[in-house]
Image: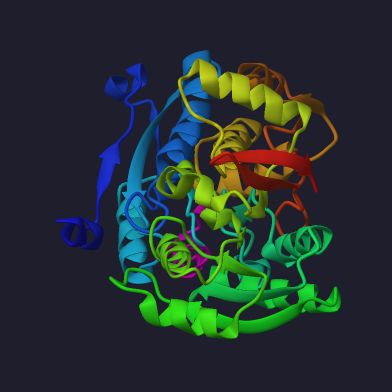
Amino acid sequence: MRKLITAMFIIYSCFITKAFSDGHAIKMGVILGFTGPIESLTPAMAASAELAFKEASESGKLLGGKSILVERADSTCVDSAAATTAAEGLISNGVVAIMGADCSGVTGAIATNVAVPNGVVMISPSATSPSLTDLNDKGYFFRTAPSDARGGQVLANITKDRKVKSIAITHTNNDYGKGLADVYEAAVKSHGIEVTTVTAHEEGKGDYGAEVATLASAGGDALAVLGYLDQAGGSIIEGSLDSGSFDKFILSDGMYGESLVERFGKDLNKSFGSRPGSMSKGANIFIDVAKSAEIDASGPFTGQSYDAAALITLAMQAGGKADRSTIQANVMNVANAPGKKIYPGELSEALDLLAKGKSINYEGATDVELTEVGETNGAFLEFEIKGGKFIDKKQR
């Protein structure tokens, strides 16, 4: 059944506001991997984005009282053909912008084959491959998660600071995994850390015994798992623990999630890693805003999802129209200084200021500041696992 669902183009409405009946609803797309190797992460990401859309809708101030109708689609995270088909369906249904996608490979495929040719803005909350920086996007692709060009360096610095002397690396065999592995390998070597092997793995296999055997043969003080928690990454950790090959794991952001510690508990107590995030004013405000909406903001990319949706909404208001070109022309204007700083839960105020012709500087949950190519430099959180729980240590 899951294979059938994944292959199909799936769209379903998340919430329908009061304005839908009188034709005032603005269609907005949310495309994330609701099935696949990060399926335990995406419900909170989608809910966070939809919280921003709902906040703007219920304010009554969006373009004179318009509201937003969200349509979801499944990117699968790893199947570019299925993701492209799903995105084509969103475009055909008339969405004015897309919050997403999530994983880097499918994000690049959707942007190149669907969004950019149709003049539709995409803002990804979690696609981190360095290759996306050079995407020929004609100004239609943005991201609120920082690139792994920096993320790999941060993870390497943490590895050095924790006095790891040698590592084996396994990465998911896609744009995300390869891009992060390249940066991370070079950075740890520059710190004098021995890399015993770099091995790619495929998602969705039933058995990873061969991969674990290769990694075990190479050895190392720790195994760096640069992948996804709900499929191959988790299975390789399981095989490594069962065989006694490794008991310390260095985890990328795609491995951060409650399903991992629920699965392995205290067996991961020596493990650590990094993920995009901060301990800023906006981050703390978002935790409270999300909690009031019964959304668990502890997972990765929830704040980035809220921010992506907020930027789309505010760009419409800044331009005075709910159309694709208006959004593209105004994302940078609302994201950066000058203007009144805006944090989570303050979209009503922001919409009011924009309606009066005033400027805003959207800080959001993740200290948004977009570069000239439309991506954020962002911050990272160092985390570790103790007592079978993720603990954020400090901002990097």
In the rendered image, residue 193, in percent from the top left (x then y), is placed at: 79, 76
Rendered view: 290 above or below 234: above
Say if 131 sits above or below 394 in the image.
Answer: below
Left or right position of 59 against 166: left
| Nearest the eye: 221 or 191 | 221
Q: Magenta-highlighted stretch: main secondary structure?
A: helix
In screen coordinates, is 211 left or right of 380? left
Residue at 66% over, 33% down: 318
> Residue 339, percent across and down?
82, 29
Regarding residue 98, the answer to whether it shows in the image is: no
- Viewer-nearest residue: 157 or 117: 157
User: Front-most of 314 and 71?
Assistant: 71
- Quarter of the image holding residue 372? bottom right
Residue in view at x 39 percent, y 53 percent:
33
Identify whether 307 is placed above or below 17: below
Specify the quadrant of the image occupied by residue 167: bottom right
Image quadrant where one finds the N terminus: bottom left
**Residue in the picture at 59% in, 84% down:** 218
Q: Give the range drawn in magenta.
A: 104-122
Count of numbered labels shown in the rendering: 0
Image location (x, y in percent) of residue 266: 52, 45
In the rendering, at what x and y percent does residue 369 appear? 77, 44
In the image, residue 215 sits, relative to residue 394, either above or below, namely below
The colour scheme is rainbow
Answer with the quarter of the image where residue 36 lies.
Answer: bottom left
Which residue occupies 55% across, 74% down?
Answer: 170
Q: Is residue 365 something that shows in the picture?
A: yes
Residue 5 in magenta stretch: no
